[in-house]
Amino acid sequence: MKVKVKDVVPGAILNDNVFTDNGLLLVQKGAVLNDNIIEKLREYNIEYIDIGISTKEEDLKRIGELYSHTVDKVKNRFEIIKLQNTVEISEFDDIVDELMDNINSNEILFYSKLLEGKNDYILEHSINVSLTAMLMGKWLSFNKDDIKILGICGILHDVGKVLIPDEILNKRTPLSPNEYVVMKNHTKYGYQLLKKSPLVDERVKAVALSHHERINGKGYPFGLSANSISIYSRIVAICDVYDEVTSKREYKPKKNLLSGLKVVFDDSYNGLDPFFSRVFLENAAFAYQGCKCLLSDGQVGRIIKIHSEKPERPWVALEHKFLNLEVNRYINVVDIF
């Protein structure tokens, strides 16, 4: 299908090679178009290209392979950090570069939730927060370098947990008050690990230390408030909360994805940055429009509209009617798939 480059959206697949006016290969047939490739086409004044649209199954397979590969690499790097008590930041640069090429659409939020649950929670959580933080950077129109920093902040925000005793870190029941005090030290441990390397960006160190701080002063480890907390920490805090509540743990069931959005909305009045929370909610809502959902009365529908202030009460298309869950409050979304 021939389309104008100005109308192309990320995720399309190139059906034919694209050459410059000088005959040099610019983009190879089969490439999945992302923002960087589309911008390159524009820079070379390419007006039309031949594309196809990848299916959800194709996207899921491609991203699934990357996700599994990334989990293995992060696991290896974290094991080395635990042994050597230091962080080699260049290795995480490479990991995040690869992830950046696959945040072409908001749907990565949905795909990452389909793919998780097969490996270590800490590893998957770090990858999910990294992906979501980079999406936030795109939504906020950050430049490419700052989006990458957000990705590194996300993947290393919990790096201090490698120094938490395994019996606490991997406990299958809720932590005791004393164990929770120990767990909270992961913020300080992460900062101490990262500050050993002069090559680690200060923003990454700040996020490791303060992603549990809250603008109302009720976070930890220092009870910072408002502008005392970096914008990168405030952004990662939102991604951290969302992924934590929508992930399954041994001692608690995960909330469905829309309930996770509601937690972010509620917490935007209780410590999360309200501006960044609004940006997250308004954009994340689009990721789940079009997804199938299971309702509490057993019906299966498709989400067609999500209100950012009531994300758990979407409009749902059923076989012969539309259902507005803001009105039909006796029916809830149980799951999204």
Image (spheres, rainbow, N blue to C red):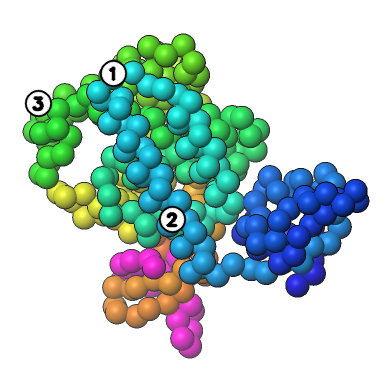
Span shown in magenta: 314-337
Q: Is residue 141 above or below residue 67?
A: above
Residue located at (26% from left, 45% from top)? 120
Residue topped by disc 1: 85
Residue located at (42% from left, 14% from top)? 197
Residue topped by disc 2: 65
The mark that comes first in sequence, 1 or 2, is: 2
Residue 94 percent location from the top left of the image: 50, 34
Task: Tell me, yes or no, whether the two marked residues, 1 and 3, touch with CB atoms within 8 Å.
Answer: no
Q: CA distance from mark 2 to mark 3?
A: 39 Å
Residue 238 percent location from the top left of the image: 42, 38
* Left-right relation of 257 to 148: left
Determine if residue 227 is in view. no
In the image, what residue type sits under mark 2?
Answer: Glu
Q: Foreground: 263 or 252?
A: 252
Please tell me whether mark 1 or mark 3 is closer to you in this view.
1
Q: Which mark is residue 178?
A: 3
In the image, what residue type sits under mark 1?
Answer: Asn
Q: Foreground: 245 or 25?
A: 25
Quarter containing the N terminus:
bottom right
Q: Is residue 77 magenta?
A: no
Residue located at (86% from left, 57% from top)? 47
Q: Foreground: 161 or 24?
A: 24
Q: CA distance from mark 1 to mark 3?
A: 25 Å
Determine if residue 185 is in view. yes
The mark that comes first in sequence, 2 or 3, is: 2
The mark that comes first in sequence, 1 or 3, is: 1
In the image, what residue type sits under mark 3?
Answer: Asn
Residue 11 percent location from the top left of the image: 62, 59
* Left-right relation of 248 to 333: left
